Image (tube, rainbow, N blue to C red):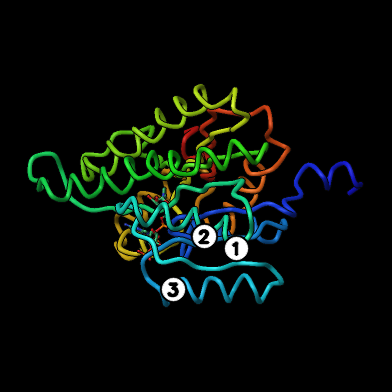
């Protein structure tokens, strides 16, 4: 690879904030961004998981720190962004990854489950983006990467709140992309297929459900968290400077089928 190609994807000198980056998909993306040279701030609730994720990045030669953050608490989001500035002097890339899956079908879902899922999976992405906005604008290479879902594209009778929240992530992404293009901030979404994480462990352990997913996925398998790293680096780097408002599946062909 020559210097020009390397410069396209090089994240040296940039600072990334990854919500929920202490496990699963968020950690896979955080590792990839750190490998590409970004300093990574992991913002999540479970401090043991966060410490382990920071240690994992450091053990592969990267730079990272963790901040305790509940994405549903605006003061926590503000503190996480402030930490990026106080530790590293900037914030260039926001990865809105934290998410939960709970509740059930429309007939029975409880109001509190609906509200928690909408708050965590949709509203918090707006509030984190809003808090980060002046820093991303000042960066001159600001990027927001939102984690959507196949259920952003397809309905789910089993998870009405989850699919509704993730559908909203696509429109939030497009609206932010259009609104913030002039500020030089690109806003895109990744649609992961079925990825092996804590969230999908119950599906993986349910043989009938699992077989249905494998049958429905052209690649014939689950993806792994580190398989999101390439899309993350692309959407965080200069390689995507004219790419905004895009919803990018990383799903073994699921959305194409
Ligand atoms: P995990 O359960 O492994 O990770 C979810 C992460 O979100 C955890 O690190 C958790 O951190 C964090 N989180 C949840 N609630 C909060 C909160 N209120 N404040 C801060 N952090 C929070 O699942 P995945 O890695 O699978 O999920 C990551 C994202 O990917 C989610 O948005 C999910 O919807 C999405 N996704 C996952 C797919 C899959 O197949 N796995 C497919 C499509 C989308 P902590 O434990 O510290 O609270």
Mark 1 vs mark 3: give the one in front.
Answer: 1
CA–CA distance in space, label 1 to label 3:
21 Å
Of residue 213 and residue 15, the one placed in the foreground of this image is 15
Q: Residues within 10 Å of mark 3 (few under 14, many from 20)?
A: some
Q: Which mark is residue 244?
A: none
Residue 39 position within the rendered picture, expressed as x and y whole percent measured from the top left = 64, 60
Q: Going by the image, does 108 lie left or right of 119?
A: left
Residue at the front extreme, as displayed: 86
Residue 49 is tagged as: 3
- If you read the primary sequence from the N terminus, does the residue marked by circle 3 or circle 2 appear first? 3
Q: Secondary structure at mark 3?
A: helix
- Alpha-carbon span between mark 1 and mark 2: 6 Å
**x%, y% of residue 240?**
68, 35
Residue 83: mark in rendering: 2
Badge 1 is on which residue? Answer: 87
Contact (CB < 8 A) between labels 3 and 2? no
Residues under numbered marks 1 and 2 in contact, where contact means CB atoms less than 8 Å apart:
yes
| Element under disc 2 | helix
Q: Find residue 108 and report its image quarter.
A: top left
Query: Is the residue marked by circle 2 packed among few (<14), some (14-19), or many (20+) residues within 10 Å?
Result: some
Compare residues 93 and 237 and report the one nearer the observer. Answer: 93
- Foreground pick, 82 / 168: 82
Quadrant location, ligand no. 1 = bottom left
Residue 82 point in image, percent of width and height? 50, 55
Q: Is residue 209 above or below residue 7?
A: below
């Amino acid at each position: 690879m020559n210097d020009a190609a390397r410069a396209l994807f090089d994240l040296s000198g940039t600072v990334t904030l990854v919500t929920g980056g202490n496990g699963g998909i968020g950690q896979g993306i955080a590792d990839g961004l750190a490998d590409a040279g970004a300093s990574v701030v992991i913002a999540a609730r479970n401090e043991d998981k966060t410490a382990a994720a920071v240690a994992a990045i450091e053990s592969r030669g990267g730079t990272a720190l963790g901040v305790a953050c509940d994405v549903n608490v605006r003061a926590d989001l503000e503190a996480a962004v402030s930490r990026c500035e106080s530790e590293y002097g900037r914030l260039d890339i926001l990865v809105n990854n934290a998410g939960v899956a709970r509740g059930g079908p429309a007939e029975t879902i409880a109001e509190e489950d609906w509200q928690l899922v909408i708050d965590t999976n949709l509203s918090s992405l707006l509030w984190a983006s809003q808090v980060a906005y002046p820093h991303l604008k000042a960066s001159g290479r600001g990027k927001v990467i939102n984690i959507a879902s196949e259920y952003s594209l397809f309905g789910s009778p089993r998870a009405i709140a989850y699919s509704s929240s993730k559908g909203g992530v696509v429109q939030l992404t497009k609206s932010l992309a259009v609104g913030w293009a002039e500020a030089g901030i690109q806003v895109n979404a990744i649609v992961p297929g079925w990825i092996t994480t804590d969230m999908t462990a119950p599906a993986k352990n349910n043989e009938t459900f699992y077989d249905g997913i494998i049958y429905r996925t052209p690649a014939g398998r689950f993806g792994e968290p580190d398989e999101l790293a390439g899309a993350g680096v692309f959407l965080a780097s200069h390689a995507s400077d004219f790419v905004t408002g895009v919803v990018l599946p990383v799903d073994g062909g699921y959305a194409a089928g």
